[in-house]
Image (spheres, rainbow, N blue to C red):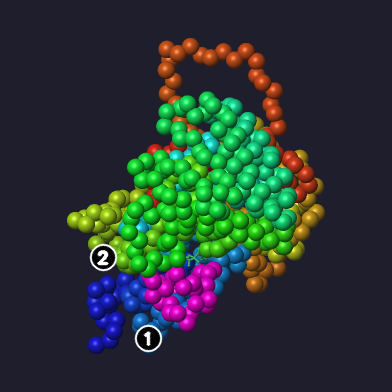
Amino acid sequence: MSRSSHTQALLGPELYKKVRETKILVVGAGGIGCELLKNLVLVGFANIEIIDLDTIDLSNLNRQFLFRKPDISKSKSLVAAASARHFNPNSGIKINARHGNVKDSENDLEWIAGFGLVMNALDNMDARRHVNRLCQAANVPLIESGTAGYLGQVTPFIKDTTECFDCVPKPTPKAFPVCTIRSTPSEPIHCIVWGKTYLFGKLFGEDDEDMDTEELDKAKAGGENAEEIENLKKEAAAFRQVRKNLSAEGGPLSVFHKVFNEDIQRLLAMEDMWKKEGRVKPVPLDYDTIMDDSFTVPPLRVAPAAQPANGDKSNGKAKPAALLRDQKELSLKENLELFLDSCKRLSARAVAFPDTPLSFDKDDDDTLDFVLATANLRATAYGIPNKTRFDVKEMAGNIIPAIATTNAIIAGLIVMQSLNLLNRIHSSSNGASSSAPDVPLRNVFLRSEPSKPLGAFIPQNADPSCSVCRDVYVPFKVDLAKCTLGNFVQDVVMGWLNGTEFEKKEDDEEVEWTVFEAGRLLADPDFEDNHERTLEDLDVKRGKILTVRDEDAKYRPIHFCVCEPAADATTPFTLPCAKPTVPLAYVQPEAVRDSSEEPEIIESVPPQTEPKDLPSTTAGVKRPAPEDDQGDEAKKRKITVVDDDDDFEIL
Ligand SMILES: Nc1ncnc2c1ncn2[C@@H]1O[C@H](COP(=O)(O)OP(=O)(O)OP(=O)(O)O)[C@@H](O)[C@H]1O
Ligand SMILES: [Zn+2]
């Protein structure tokens, strides 16, 4: 009996044929991706492409079991494919492994259209959104997945049948008030966020004065203490000077003195600030007394009974005999030394690469050491418990421990979803109903409820206002070196689109269209400066999108997705035979007005001010590009739980 006969019997000949023939794309060869690839191979999927941009790290080996120690530093996708093949040898399975970013330009609309089904096994929102858009544009079903600790989710997205990834609002990152972070922290996380997003940025990151002022003005307008905000503005200005001197002899020590002594003294002088109930005054730190062990550590605000002696953070608890280095709590003196040393290391890097601002990375020891020491020194000053390197890495890096079993369950569910989708695709493509029972599409989730670990709900319909799945997409096969913008405007916008709803004229009025590429305005009826230039010259590349919009935003935008020219093309570009139907743009229903309310009388209309963030055009600034992402609209939809590397936000 052959290895596949059970599967064939279980799935039936029709579905098994689909399994063998459908070209599958797996994006990501990490925790879920490895499990998934093994499952696909075992079920008998025979035409698989897997892409991942990363190489194997030691920390992956505990759960990404297609990898072994000798594979460290090798390409994840190549090794995963090589290992997975062994699970079902001699079965004619083809795995095309690619080491690269799914966002690379060669991964365009045509590429994605070559797959029958796409499965995401990613770890970040940006790549997920990119694949979602490609799948919507090419009308390829996508199975999205994610895990966070014991939780997980598998969701099918099918154009015009279900919502898409971007229809679903995402949870906003955890936010903290500015003053809590900058002046009155009360928890370890406040100190970590301060070290990571504030002090690190001030000393080594991009120093954006305008952004800083804007943030503080916003906080003031939002009702935070005005005097304190002014104080913080002065403090920020002083940092610019400190930053300049950081690499000089004694630079790190002067930063320590400014941040942990002078700035705290200044805060203490603001008497009103400390009258508020629950506020605990910080204690300025002093280099000399910390170093000679005579500094009196302020009592912990939450555990006043335990008054640890200087440097002894054990709180009387017995220490396990052999703690790992990262799990040991540092003494105050050790934190101070680490602060000075990490400052020195980072400022040397800043001097060596002055044009590359540094950014925090949990896996970059210099940056982690800096945040660890900074957070602990600040915590000590405010009577807040210190954290170990292990804790700080987890908190600053937003790490949710990955659990191999969760990944395995989710990968199994992805395969179940794929079988259901293939069944449906099959029955709808030949018009006949499938012999298989019509199983409805479901979003499946894993929860930490032992008696009922799996749950499911029916996916919602697409959000009519979604700026991803409701727009129109057209493959645009073009020789970028031969096609000018003028060709595109004349032959595509005013020619090919003629006759579509988009180009219908009312009362002989010309349709006011615009052509954008990302945020850049390339052309409109009054802006012809770039018509002579080729698309290549205008830096339009394969994988990019030329978007045509009508100025009144009456219709949905039309996105021309730039693809390789057709092999036998005799013209600069080729378009599909069928022109698209361009639907009307979604209009938010007007809120029901309370008729008893008197209308508001506006006496004078304030003069229109220039929008602040005008996008650049190729030939100067013209008009703002419409916001691509309307995702912030308050939509009362179910929030998807997907793990992500999203950051904290400071309000
Ligand atoms: N744009 C992208 N293109 C291709 N692969 C991507 C892209 N973004 C992320 N990935 C891959 O998706 C995979 C996600 O797997 P996983 O969530 O297990 O992350 P990991 O990096 O392996 O583990 P950890 O983050 O816990 O160290 C990773 O292998 C990552 O390289
Ligand atoms: Zn959508």
Residue 239 percent coordinates (x, y): 67, 44
Mark 2 vs mark 1, CA separation in Å: 29 Å
Q: Nearer the viewer, residue 526 or 155?
A: 155
Does residue 572 appear to the left or right of 24 in the view shown? right
Q: Residue at x 45, y 33 (%)?
A: 279
Image quadrant in which you'd find residue 569: bottom right
Look at the image and tell me whether residue 108 can be seen: no
Position of 194 relative to 336 (above/below): above
Q: Secondary structure at mark 1?
A: loop
Residue 45 percent coordinates (x, y): 38, 75
Residue tagged by mark 2? 436
Q: Nearer the viewer, residue 121 or 372?
A: 372
Of all residues, the one furthest to the left in this rendering is 451
Quadrant in the picture for the N terminus: bottom left
Q: Nearer the viewer, residue 369 or 444?
A: 369
Q: Residue at x 61, y 56 (%)?
A: 340
Under mark 2, the amino acid is Ala
Q: Secondary structure at mark 2?
A: loop
**Residue 242, numbered label:** none
Does residue 171 appear to the left or right of 101 in the view shown? left
Q: Residue at x 54, y 51 (%)?
A: 290
**Residue 89, numbered label:** 1
Under mark 1, the amino acid is Pro
Question: What predominant SS class does the magenta segment belong to?
Answer: loop
Q: Mark 2, mark 1: which one is toward the viewer?
A: 1
Residue 204 percent coordinates (x, y): 65, 53
Instruction: Tell me the magenta residue range.
Output: 46-75
